[in-house]
Amino acid sequence: MFKEHEGDLTERNALPVRDAAQEAARILGHVIQCDGAHATIATTAAGNKSQEAGQWSVGKFISISLPNTRTVGLVHDVHVDGPWYEEADNRMLVHVDLIGEVRDGQDGAPPVFDRGIAKYPHIGAIAHRIRQRDLAAIYEIGGNDAVPVGNLSQDESISANVAMGRTLNRHFAVVGSTGVGKSSAVSLLLHKAIEARPNLRVLILDPHNEFASAFPDVSTTLDSETLDLPFWMFRLEELVEVLYLGRDPIVEEVELLRELIPAAKHEHRGAGNVSLRRASEPGGITADTPVPYRMADLMRILDDRMGMLDSKDLRPVYRALRQRLDAGTRDPRFRFMFGSRIIEDNITAAIGLIFRIPTQGKPVTCFQMAGMPSEVVNAVCSVLARLAFDLTLWGDGQIELLLLCEEAHRYMPVDPRMGFAPTRHALARIAKEGRKYGCYLGIVTQRPGELDPTIFSQCSTVFAMRLPNEQDQAIIRSAISDASASALAFLSSMGQRECIAFGDGVAATMRMKFEVLDRRYIPGSAVRDHTQDEMVQDIDLNTIVERMRSGGRDGFSDEVWSNANVPAAPAAGGPEQRPSLARLSPYVDEPIRQERRPDGRLFG
């Protein structure tokens, strides 16, 4: 029995060993120079058999044989040492980056790859084509969360695996120019993440309204019509962003709001004229506390304060703020904030709907922003990002949440003077601290050069697709290790669905091609199918114009806008009555016509 066991063991160990002829065919060159990160290999290629030189093509892996290990190198430069001879052998110099070493497993186990190099190649070491088993060992990821997302570009028979746990927990980024399959890659990664992590909830900030069609069975859609995000859940700086339509606020008006909003909150809670507590005291209410209040109470308190003013210097500030509040509450585009006629503490229902608690079989929320006014998008994204972090922070590890930011450079621009500071701060907090509590960040952008480098540096796994812009390539080059930097030479010439993946989520830097995604899971496929497969015979321009006016809503029944073009009949014996400018257009900068209350005071 011992002899049979010995024979079996010898047979298993002999599987990867080639005969002398095979080994000779695999020998390609010898090491003539080596330092801590690179090596140079000298080889020859017959001029009339130039296809042999293709074994040294840029991007190929080679193996350098040592007594107990095999050093793995990635070819990044090949050139002929001298003129090219068609009828003779030509001397070639091949420069490779050393990325790790492979050791044979014990008792016939598969080879094991290590990113570090314990023993460097010596001068004269033999270099040859890498074995398929060694190539598979380089990208082998241990653990139960290894998920296949495509195939290696060097060998399509080898699966490209991603450690989904490390990819999510330490944040990830997908970058690439328009038309390279970036959205399809994101859809594929999200589908794989949901399968691997059943408890994961996903909130997608979708500026182009394209991801809802990619998750038909597991997602719910929110837009300006279905979103219920009451104004009292906004912090003061977020509410100011909405009221001022993205312009610089007036300091005096903001400070007045900071003083009056807590009073309105106490009014709604039935505190009456009870003196306000300081913010530092237990139970103190500030302008940022998410406590319900009525906008009508706020404006009534503002009117009362304005009536008690002795000096006329502050009255213009009060009047301007009063008009601004009135214009915001009347604007039909902000109906998701001010549309509720009954103010109640529905924060639990609102958060549960947005973040899918309970999931009810649909863990993905697609927040469509294409139909929302641009002035309010930044504030809404700030609220959602802040709520996402707080939800996981106080959830005691019971909630796993991924916030995916499409077109992330819009929210986190490299220039701090651009964008909305609270949105940047909320997303930066998730990037720096979120993984401790189960709040993860996914960044998708076509311009990484315009993205805040501090937030991008927190993404431990990067999927870099084709990037022709040199500035964008420089950002990716600064994020990858020096040993794999040569792999980025392909960034400007990669094909569709192809990327270079590097970071904690993969075993080693790899050039891979994503799986072909089913057409019904490709973002925006429903719109493209309608426009490409059907011949448009007639275009109803009137319907398009109505949808433009209504912000994409099919119904156009808002009473403020439906009668906006019909001037009121002049009263008998009185001046002509014109509709308020606030009702006609939120963009008009002219002062709103002032009317008098029954007590003689003015209001907008």
Image: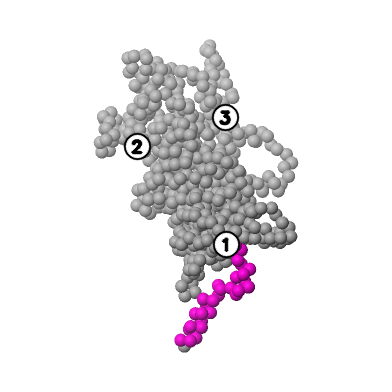
Callout 2: SS: loop
Residue 562: mark:
3
Callout 1: SS: strand
In the rendered image, residue 4 lying in the magenta stretch gets the answer yes
Determine whether, in the image, residue 85 is placed left or right of residue 230: right
- The crowd level at tag 3 (other Cα within 10 Å; few <14, some 14-19, many 20+) is few
Instruction: Tell me which corner region of the image, top left, top right, bottom left or bottom right, holds residue 40.
Output: bottom right
The residues bearing labels 1 and 3 have C-alpha atoms spaced at a distance of: 82 Å
Q: Residue at x 53, y 48 (%)?
A: 174
Determine whether, in the image, residue 26 is placed left or right of residue 334: right
Residue 157: mark:
none
Dot 2 amino acid type: Thr
Span colored in magenta: 2-29
In the rendered image, residue 466 lying in the magenta stretch gets the answer no
Please name which of the two marks, 3 or 2, marks the residue nearer to the observer. 2
Q: Residue at x 49, y 20 (%)?
A: 592
Circles 3 and 2 in contact, beta carbons < 8 Å: no
- The crowd level at tag 1 (other Cα within 10 Å; few <14, some 14-19, many 20+) is many
Residue at mark 1 = 30
Q: Position of residue 362 (x, y in %)?
A: 49, 53
Residue at mark 2 = 289
